[in-house]
Amino acid sequence: MTSSARRNLIFVAVLLGMLLAALDQTIVATTLPTVVADLGGAGHQAWVVTSYLLASTIATAVVGKLGDLFGRKAVFQVSVVIFLAGSILCALAGSMGALVAARAVQGIGGGAIMVTAMAVIGEVIPLRERGRYQGALGAVFGVTTVIGPLLGGFFTDHMTWRWAFWINLPVAVLVFAVAAVAIPALGEKSRPRIDYAGIVLVGLGASGLTLATSWGGGEYAWSSPMIIGLFVGSAVALVAFVVVELRATEPILPMRLFANPVFTVCCVLAFIVGFAMLGAMTFLPTYMQFVDGVSATESGLRTLPMVVGLLITSIGSGSLVGRTGRYKIFPVLGTAIMAVGFFLLSRMNVETPLWREALYLFVLGTGIGMCMQVLVLTVQNTTDLADLGVATSGVTFFRAIGSSFGAAIFGSLFANFLAARIPAALAASGAPPEAAESPQALHRLSAEMARPIVDAYSESLGTVFLFAVPVAVLGFVVSLFLKEVPLRETEAAAAGDLGEGFGMPGAESGEKILEVAIGRLFRDAPEIRLRYLAAAHRWDLDVPQLWALLQVYRHQQVYGSAELTRIGERLRVPREVLEPTFDALVDRGCVRRAGEELMLTPAGVDRVDAVSSAIVEQIVAKLATSSSFDGRPDRQQVTAALDRIAHRMLVQRDWYDAAAAKN
């Protein structure tokens, strides 16, 4: 295990990497009207968001396993380089098509950074502290949801929209440099079989459907061979994906999960939540800049009521579920409130006062937030340990795909509705064509001349929001079928981070998720202090001898060998103070010396196993007192995982009781 200083340096690198990747999901929304005015291609503006989301989602499916193959450090650094290259290409883009392609490159790097960052934390942070560190990473997603639109608006107004991408360069270089110095060359753990066919097929299916919904009715007629071909090709790809997943050794989305109706319902709801959140966030700044006539920065500020509502209910619902064990009410209420929110947004126009606009946005954000955390928690609560990681990833995968569809479909509807209204608006106002493409040019006109174009934007976006109401109503109907089962405490803890609701699909195994949950449950808990365990089990070794035995075990596992001098140096205790206790272990036959090296004997190994078993007993007992853990079909599997986790706790824990030391 790394020293505390190095561990914190690693965390800084990971935190900055996550900040880079998460920020670029939201920063471009406020820049889009200016980007369109500069580059043209208004029909493709949704793809600036969608291409990033799709590429990120697909990248996360494979990067976790690449980290297993080649080591986390190498994959993390390559991910940063890809993200850096994508940012440079975005900043230099001379056309909307080039920007969309560059955003896809950036998305590959961003998705890879997210997954690898979480994996690095899992490998270098001790179990007892992992929940705290991952909680901080999760908060990054909530923070970037707030500051992304503000930064995008600031750069657009005071510099240029290209600085939304140039700003990534110094941060990415810093992340790469810190990672090169701080992150250890974590060894390859396994040689997993990567489901390349599944990744390619789901990517083709999702991309084809997004293209079809984005181009249909605008670039091509809905009955054109291109749109029909995209729909047919996507359907074929998705059917082939299902066939491949049924046969794959390690599928990215096991089809057996859909036999669980709770998982299926949660995936549908996650899709709808993603659809609503990114769809609304992408086009609200466009509405505010064209209809309200505000700057890019102010349009970012005006979206904050939605973000505030979202964060309040996202955090609050997670806390209430943890306390009450009841979760079904939140997606039911959340989807209903979302439908109301979209209907209210559809009633906005140029006459709507600011306070009412803010209230409508707050209502929509409140509904979205009620669903985000709870859906992940629900799936983790009803899934066996072996599928815990992939089920969690599956829900966030559907949320990410929903986000891509939301941005694309909102964008397609908006482009179609606007194209039908703008010619008449331009003719009525006598305004130059650029007034319909640039909010700055529009609001340089007189109010009377600008009004027909402003009304065209208001009516077009209002109709888009009205079309979103049936989607939210469908979510409400689906949520009524959500089954509520007694809550398990481990999953409540595991789903407590904001990142679960906001982030991209992860690659953590069920055992990793269980580790994080147990780390939170037993942080500073007296039940696993050595003095408590020794008193409860009356072993033949006293507390100092047990402590010394575990130090030998720990150093053998972490450093490859145990030497009294190294143990003393690490603890900053003179060797002479420690020597009598270790000599007693040698006398009892638990440890033997080979020169300077200390090694566990079979008797010593038996005593270490006894401590591990005692920890497992404490964990199982605590779980059983607050959940339906007893009698579940996966109990034996969970107990085996707990045994492995207990041995890692032996290695990672210092077994130093500060409170006892003061007495």
Image (cartoon, rainbow, N blue to C red):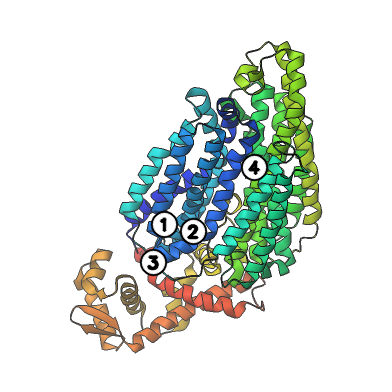
| Cα separation between marks 4 and 2 | 24 Å
Query: What residue is at 77 percent from the left and 42 percent from the top?
Result: 222
Q: Earlier in the sequence, mark 3 or mark 2?
A: 2
The percent coordinates of residue 359 (x first, y second) are 72, 33
Answer yes or no: do the residues labelled 1 and 2 have beta carbons within 8 Å?
yes
Q: Which residue is mark 1?
A: 75
Q: Earlier in the sequence, mark 3 or mark 1?
A: 1
Q: Earlier in the sequence, mark 4 or mark 1?
A: 1
Neighbour tally class for label 2: few under 14, some 14-19, many 20 plus, Cα within 10 Å: many
Neighbour tally class for label 4: few under 14, some 14-19, many 20 plus, Cα within 10 Å: many
From the image, state whether disc 4 or disc 1 is nearer to you: 1
Q: Which mark is drawn over residue 657?
A: 3
SS assignment at label 2: helix
| Cα separation between marks 4 and 1 | 28 Å
| Cα separation between marks 3 and 2 | 39 Å
What is the three-letter code of the residue carrying label 1?
Val
What is the three-letter code of the residue carrying label 3?
Asp
Q: Which residue is mark 2?
A: 63
| Cα separation between marks 3 and 1 | 38 Å
Point out the image quarter for the N terminus: bottom left
| Cα separation between marks 3 and 4 | 48 Å
In the image, 101 versus 304, the foreground residue is 101
SS assignment at label 4: helix
Q: Which mark is drawn over residue 278?
A: 4
Q: Earlier in the sequence, mark 4 or mark 2?
A: 2
Question: In the displayed structure, would residue 152 be above or below residue 608?
Answer: above
Q: Earlier in the sequence, mark 1 or mark 2?
A: 2
Q: Which mark is drawn over residue 139?
A: none
What is the three-letter code of the residue carrying label 4?
Leu
Query: What residue is at 49 percent from the left and 44 percent from the top?
Result: 106
In the image, 15 versus 543, the foreground residue is 15
Q: Quadrant of residue 491?
A: bottom right
